[in-house]
Image: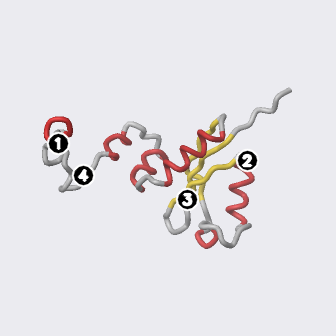
Amino acid sequence: MTKVHCYYVYILKCSDKSYYTGVTNNLELRIAQHDLGVNKEAYTYNRRPIELVFSIEFKYVDKAIAFEKQLKGWSRKKKEAVINKEWEKLKELAECKNESSTRRKGYKRDKDWSG
């Protein structure tokens, strides 16, 4: 019988209100390790207590790692949209709001940037 592997991407809210994102194949054990402060060099060690605020299960480790890396690069607002399962907000939060943005100035790449 083939053993089914599960991988989890999770977000912890730390005592300083920051977020920690990780990936594991044993969510219960990994949360316990964070809680106990097993690794003194870990980001969460001096930010305990921690709270699990989000987790999602993956069948394939490469998909889990890719999603974890994606989350780690996201803004706090985007992470909070994920935590609150407000997936529809992600597109809006991904749009550049910078005044110098070429899109905000009305440029269209194909039309205005063609040489």
Q: Residues within 10 Å of mark 2 (few under 14, many from 20)?
A: few
Element type where label 3 sits in the image: strand
Residue at which label 4 appears: 97
Q: CA distance from mark 4 to mark 3?
A: 25 Å
Closest to the camera, between mark 4 and mark 3, is 4
Disc 2 marks a residue whose amino acid type is Asn
Quickly name the residue at label 2. Answer: 26
Residue 113, image x and y in percent? 17, 42
Tell me which numbered mark, 3 or 2, is placed earlier along the sequence: 3
Give the residue drawn at x 15%, y 43%. Answer: 107
- Name the one closer to the observer, 57 or 15: 57
Q: Which residue is mark 1?
A: 113
Relative to 41, residue 34 above or below: above
Residue 84: x and y in percent read 46, 45
Q: Position of residue 57 (x, y in %)?
A: 63, 38
Which amino acid type corresponds to the residue marked 3 in the rendered image?
A: Tyr
